[in-house]
Image (spheres, grey):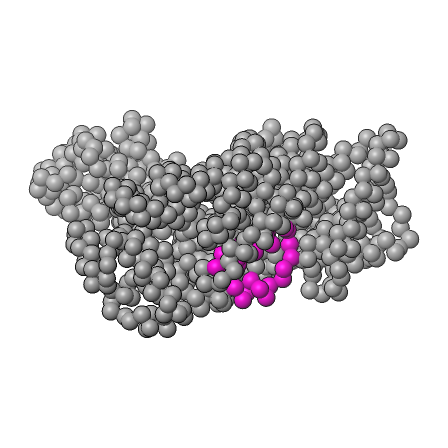
Amino acid sequence: MIGRAGVVEEILRNLAGTTPGAGCLLVGEPGIGKTAVMQHVLRNLEAETYIVQVRGSEFASRTPFGALTFLLSDLDPEFSEHPVMILRGLTRLVTERAGGLPVLLAVDNAEELDEFSAMVLTQMVHNRSAGMLVAFRDFCSAPAEFAGLWRDGILARVDLEPLSVKETAAYLGSLLGGTVSRAAAAAINDYAGGNPHLLTLAQADFQDAGRLRQHNGSWILVPGEDIRAGRVAGAVTSTMAALTPSQSTLFQLLSMAGSLPLPVVLARLDSTELDSLQEQGLVTLNANPVPDVLITNPVMARSVRAGLTPSRQRQLFEELAPSLNTGLVLDPLVLARWLDSIGEVPARDLAVEAARQATVTGLPETAVRLISAAFDGGENAAAVIELARARTAQGEYGAALGVLARFRGSDVVPSAEDRIRLLLAECRVLCIEATGLRDPRTAEAAAEPARMRHTELFEQIEREIEALTGVGRANTAGLVRELALSRAECHSAHGRFLVNASYLDGLELPDADFRILKGAWQSEAWGMTNRQDDAAELAGKVERQLEGTDAGTRARVVGRLLHTYLFTGALSDCERLLDDPSATSGMDGTYLELAEGLLNAFAGKPEPALAALTPAVDQLAASGPAALLPLAAAAAAYCHALEERREDAGRYLQVQRSAADGGPWVVRRGARHFAALAEAALGGGNGSARFVSLAAQDHRRGAHAYELLARVTAMRLGDADSLDDVLSVAANQQGDFAALCELYAKGLGNGDAQMLLRASEQAAGSGHVLLAREISEHALGIASGAGDRATVRFIHRSRRTAAPDSPVEASDEFLGALTARERSIARKAVAGTSNKKIAEELGISVRTVEGHLYQVYSKLHVGSRRELARTIAEQAGAKK
């Protein structure tokens, strides 16, 4: 039932507490899990419902009342002579057997019922003798009687959708007995279309191909060739056995071409045969002025294509060639890949355009192959540009620079526009290298000269574009757009947010996609400086404009917004965006997994954080991108430290330290934040000093959101001098997080328990679970010290009320006033472990143990181990 809890609840809601005769239609493609969902629902109802299970089949549909034979055999002969009498007899028989219980008709494969069985079953619902749960593969082919029940509102329709990537990860984890990375889940989900039955086959296909392997306890995706005919292809294409030769050929053509105009299809296939394919749901016509025909199921299209030999692909291409010669236009990437698969070299212009599309859609290896096949050397500027972009996307920065250098040393003189694009491609690589992230095969070079070099190149590009504009060249708008976005990305990569805010202010172009991208960069720049409210408003506006953007633009924008929300403390906004499938569809699975892990780590929820971070670290270690590994490992170390798993925390810290320290500034800064938190949680003595130092660096850079985060963290770690700094920085920032930090600091400074309680409520409301708990503990400590028993009781009561359904035991609730270390020591003390033994187990001094126990007794108002044990037992008894 992974991913199906909501559907089950919806069905039960429609079946329970309604008048007799109500129910649900459950609709979903073959293998999607309708039968499993139906049986799960029936198990929930069987104790209080009389269930009659009916299953349609091709064999039974040949006989009137064939699906009801098992009931008809028990009818008196007088009831078997006429349909009306059969209906009356069956109604009486089922009612008698129910013995006063409500009756539910559970009908599977309902599209294969004969008309008489369908009539009797629906009439029993119409006359309120029974409710119904009925499942269809294809509701369009359902007997008219069922469609009538739906139109009349008697039966509610519930559609069973394919599993999401996250649900697929959980599903595969249950099959494999381990954690599955989001990258692996995304690839397998796409391969199987989210169909649970096909996912089981796809997992085996990926393992057989060596694309799915276990690494450090997680199942990860391994780069490799596309999987050809396997279990999924066999299962999907088996449905084509009944197709005519002409229909089968059309399917093969469509699998290679993607789609074909209706006139081209009708020139090869009789209209009645096409109608038959449509009626079976195998092909679809889109709504273009001249409709295109395409295979309905992308999994089937890919499976058919994977089963074609190169010789058969050539035959199909030759069959379609006359249409190509008379005006049929295929997508450049589709056409180039088709030619490549049959051993033909795409035309140069086609190869360049196809390579551009391939890189944008996340297939840089395809771009490299197409360009390399079409061009013998670096004699074409457009090809060099696309090859450099593809190599950069692969992380092969040395290779990208090599391609550009060879062209620069050639005798070819590019056009003015191509020269500018060559410089932009070089800027991109040099900017990445300047952050410290390098291709391992590239000779080491100092980062500062690279930074200076690409900065100078930007200025040169700007001058050359101005010169082109000055002589009236009309095609400079695209160059201006590329330059603007490259500079904005460069400023962000180096953490120059004040510069970026100034640069983007007033920069306008008529391109809608540019405005969306500019808004994403600008919201980040404002959020990182001191305009958090403005950033949140702009981010919301950008989110509303995402619909209709291409996958590449959407990924860049959503990634920037997630970062802005996360590091400005807007955790609820980050969670909302991550949960929006329309915004995150098509994004890199590892990036989304990391974002989910970081969100929970920031919130102070280590278990869900590690559920995402553990496979993310394993995937990143195996296949990159290398820049993200230190951040993921540091966050995982912190979460393990929160759970007091010292060995695991140390292991992930070692991964963070040994990984390449390069990439965008925000990624490196995030890694430092979590690494310092992990070391502090492990008992490092200079934790607050590390954050004071980070805050000073952030201040000089103008990254005031990070400065506030660092200063409030230093304050949380006990640095009293940071209190005034928090007040000073928070007062100059907008947003809820700044207000929360200011209230927290004021409450601490004034020793005001009530003010701290308000800060705790604000923290909890914005998703900062651990921070809310810590502030509440400060309030409890102040109230306890002042003898304010009413406030102490209020805090304990509030904690119990906040999670009335939590499985946490009452003793854990009572100990919730303590820090993680204090809770651990308290439990050991209650269990009778000596102070010396506790110190040895935790790797601390006996004096430290005694100090922690003093704090435990003070916070919980007890005076000894015996009183502590008795009080905990009383709390547990009261809960029971």
Q: What residue lies at 79% left-to-right and 51% top-to-bottom?
A: 453
Taking the magenta stretch, the answer to whether it contains residue 678 is: yes
Q: Quadrant of residue 176?
A: bottom left
The image shows residue 596, relative to residue 577, as above or below, that is: below
Instruction: Report the side of 420 relative to 732 (left or right).
Output: right
| Outermost residue, top side | 152
Q: Is residue 766 visible?
A: no
Instruction: Report the side of 690 relative to 172 (left or right).
Output: right
Where does the image place residue 340, in percent across and percent down from the top left? Answer: 69, 54
Closest to the observer, 494 or 289: 494
Where does the image place residue 326, in percent across and percent down from the top left? Answer: 72, 38
Range drawn in magenta: 653-680
Instruction: Report the side of 684 relative to 839 (left or right).
Output: right
Tell me which secondary structure the magenta stretch mostly adopts: helix
Closest to the observer, 721 or 412: 721
The image shows residue 628, relative to residue 130, as above or below, that is: below
